[in-house]
Image (cartoon, helix red, strand yellow):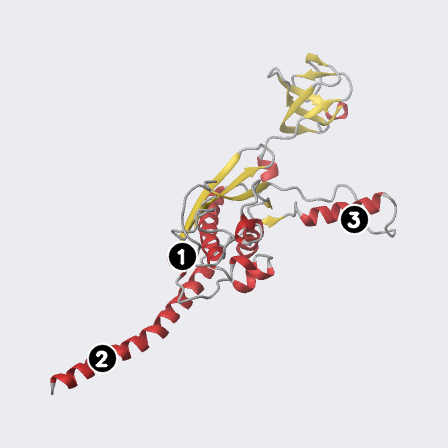
């Protein structure tokens, strides 16, 4: 075969390989997105009730995104690891409705009043690891236009526009003890997306959850993957949490409404010390009839009649 013919054949083979590689790359990107959708962890039981709160700093508006709380709520809903309770706009609407009820404006039998709100066992706050806005860099693929680019915020709170990375953190606080029971970090880059020039991950689910910006923008998808990594790690950390967070915590303190006495046993025969009205006591959880075992603020343990105290507020 002539050298010219060999060159022509080689060019044709290269061109053919190029044509084949594009569909394969696109399929690879689709497969990666499908895999990441399946990576949202699921739980066989609820780990408790969870309130997802917004961070103190409103960093997401710089990227034309909704609050990351909406994103985390989608993860929680899909994973079935927690029962969500609303402490945002839904809570405000509920309080407004209850105000109507207290004013007597609702119909009879509405069954809306005190003692119905489910308590949050845990509060989760999604945030960015740093708050450094001094580094330089370029726009994130031109996504933000002139809003955030150049030297004006290339790194804003853990999202690096030059390196196309996101570093996020999730913290969980026990609502009864105030203990921070878990913290997890997540990191993602644009290369983790498996893009072939564009696309969206979890578009339907995130849009339905009010987090559409996280599914159809580059910066949103990078942040989404970082939070997914952090949430997956978080669920692993909380896997050993008690089935009943309320029962597992220390009992709520009580306050003496009337003067009384602290007894050595629940039969109430031998008193160890008097208890003044207003004294705060800490139940141990042991009960016999109307008698509760408690500790006072000096560490004395004994029994007292529950008819003499009420829950501390």
Which residue is disc 2 drawn over? 11
Say which residue appears at 19% left-offset and 80% top-offset: 10
In the picture, the disc for residue 190 is 1
Q: Is residue 269 left or right of residue 239?
A: right
Judge by depth and name the residue closer to the eye, 48 or 183.
Answer: 183
Q: Are marks 2 and 1 in contact (CB under 8 Å)?
A: no
In the rendered image, the quadrant that contains the N terminus is bottom left
Q: Which mark, residue 124?
A: none
State how far apart marks 2 and 3 are (Cα): 73 Å
Q: What residue is shown at x 15% (from left), y 84% (from top)? A: 4
The answer to which image quadrant residue 275 occupies is: top right
* Disc 3 versus disc 1: nearer the observer: 1
- The label number, if any, that marks residue 97 in the structure image: 3
Q: Judge depth for marks 2 and 1 and give the one in front.
A: 2
Mark with earlier residue (2, 3) = 2
Q: Residues within 10 Å of mark 2 (few under 14, many from 20)?
A: few
Residue 7, quarter of picture? bottom left
Q: Residue furthest top?
A: 273
């Amino acid at each position: 075969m002539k050298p010219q013919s060999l060159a022509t054949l080689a060019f044709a083979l290269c061109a053919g390989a190029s044509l084949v590689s594009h569909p394969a790359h696109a399929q690879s990107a689709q497969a990666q997105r499908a895999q990441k959708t399946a990576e949202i962890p699921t739980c066989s039981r609820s780990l408790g009730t969870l309130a997802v709160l917004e961070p103190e700093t409103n960093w997401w508006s710089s990227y034309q995104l909704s609050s990351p709380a909406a994103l985390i709520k989608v993860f929680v809903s899909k994973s079935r690891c927690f029962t969500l309770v609303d402490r945002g706009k839904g809570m405000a609407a509920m309080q407004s409705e209850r105000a109507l009820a207290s004013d007597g404006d609702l119909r009879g039998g509405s069954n809306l009043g005190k003692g119905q709100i489910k308590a949050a066992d845990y509060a989760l706050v999604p945030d960015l690891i740093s708050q450094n806005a001094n580094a330089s860099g370029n726009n994130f693929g031109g996504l933000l236009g002139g809003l955030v680019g150049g030297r004006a915020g290339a790194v804003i709170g853990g999202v690096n526009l030059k390196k196309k990375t996101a570093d996020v953190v999730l913290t969980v606080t026990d609502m009864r003890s105030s203990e921070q029971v878990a913290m997890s970090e997540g990191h993602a880059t644009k290369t983790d997306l498996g893009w072939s020039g564009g696309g969206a991950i979890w578009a339907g689910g995130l849009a339905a959850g009010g987090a559409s910006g996280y599914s159809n923008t580059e910066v949103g998808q990078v942040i989404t993957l970082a939070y997914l990594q952090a949430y997956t790690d978080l669920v692993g950390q909380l896997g050993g949490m008690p089935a009943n967070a309320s029962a597992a915590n220390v009992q709520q303190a009580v306050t003496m409404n009337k003067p009384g006495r602290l007894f050595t046993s629940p039969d109430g025969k031998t008193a160890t010390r008097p208890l003044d009205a207003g004294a705060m006591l800490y139940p141990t959880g042991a009960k016999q009839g109307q008698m509760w075992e408690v500790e006072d603020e000096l560490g004395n343990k004994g029994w007292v009649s529950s008819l003499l105290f009420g829950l501390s507020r």
